[in-house]
Amino acid sequence: MGAEKEVLLRMRGVKTYFPLRSGVFNRSSGNVKAVDGVDLDVYRGEIIGLVGESGCGKTTLGKSLLQLVKPTAGTMEYTFKEGTQDLMKLSRKELDLARKTLQIVFQDPYSSLNPAFTIFGSLEEPLKRFGVRKRADRERIIGDLLVSVNLQREHMTRYPNEFSGGQRQRIGIARALSVNPELIVCDEAVSALDVSIQAQVLQLLLKLKREMNLTYIFITHNLSVVEYISDRIAVMYLGRIVELTETDRLFAGALHPYTKALLAAIPVADLSRRKKRSPLQGDVPSPVNPPGGCHFHPRCPECQGVCRTEVPKLITRTIDGVEHAVSCHLVE
Ligand code: SF4
């Protein structure tokens, strides 16, 4: 990324808790701490991967960024053309405008495509909302968008059920692009696709990023996908970032025991390249009552006494010119 990195989004102390209620009086009985204190800078023009097992908080963090779920605490400063604003303090009207800049592509494109509408019907709605009044203009823009995602103009008259999964995902991407955004959260955007189709959609995302100078936050549980597409990777565990660095560094020299275990679990076809396995033991604990100290300690093969009582800080070091942040008591 070089020395001229520009911070597009600065998250500090972000928490997203979901209250639990129980009993006949519906009393509060705790919180699901889905995101539990995230500090993260996203640079303009980069692809940052957010990885971790299911339940680690990565999807909630992506939705919190777009205010699709309301964060409980922290700040999310975004550098708009008009100046920097905290996304968490936007009024409803300001948030509607911000959605022109920030978009999301979901794993299931059906969630953003109404099966009763043609593709034109689904894609024209955001254009109308952002002031493209003439139908002929909307048809031209939607036709161009479909061509840009390797579909055909004529496809706008068809319904979602007439397309394959890969084509529907391209339509989901076209819909996100229709308002000319700067940052797109791709939430498991290729996870439901066959491997060969995954590769085509990843290539398409890279092409669009280059052409439109986009920034992606790429959320996935698939480390091979994130290795292919990301400039940097943040590894999350139980609502916190435990390791963050450039992609090549993470794959060549991960430092956190959780990241090492995730990497060791990647299937490798070539037996000579297969690493000694250190499979993760057990499941991710409940985010309602996360373990004290280091959240990872009950599953960590390197756990020490201090790990049970003290929360390790996420400390950034520069190693061989590369910034590498890790939260582990044993990393010097
Ligand atoms: Fe393991 Fe302790 Fe490091 Fe946590 S702080 S990852 S328990 S060694």
Image: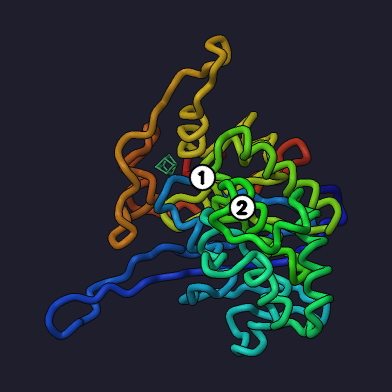
Q: From this viewpoint, which residue is outermost toward the left?
A: 24
Disc 2 C-beta below 8 A from ligand 1: no
Q: Quadrant of residue 65?
A: bottom right
Q: Which residue is disc 2 drawn over? A: 169
Query: What amino acid does circle 1 point to?
Result: Ala
Q: Is residue 304 left or right of residue 264?
A: left
Residue furthest to the top: 272
What label does residue 192 carry, if any? 1
Residue at 32% across / 70% down in the picture? 31
Label 1's element? loop
Q: Quadrant of the C terminus?
A: top right
Q: Position of residue 256 (x, y in %)?
A: 51, 39
- The residue that appears at 74% across and 46% down in the rendered structure is 204
Q: Is residue 246 visible?
A: no
Location of ligand 1 given as a quarter of the image: top left
Give the percent coordinates (x, y) of residue 213. Answer: 83, 58
Q: Position of residue 292 (x, y in %)?
A: 32, 55
Three-letter amino acid code of the residue under disc 2: Gln
CB-based contact (under 8 Å), mark 1 and mark 2: yes
Q: Around disc 2, counting alpha carbons within 10 Å, would you say few (fewer than 14), some (14 to 19), or many (20 or more)?
A: many
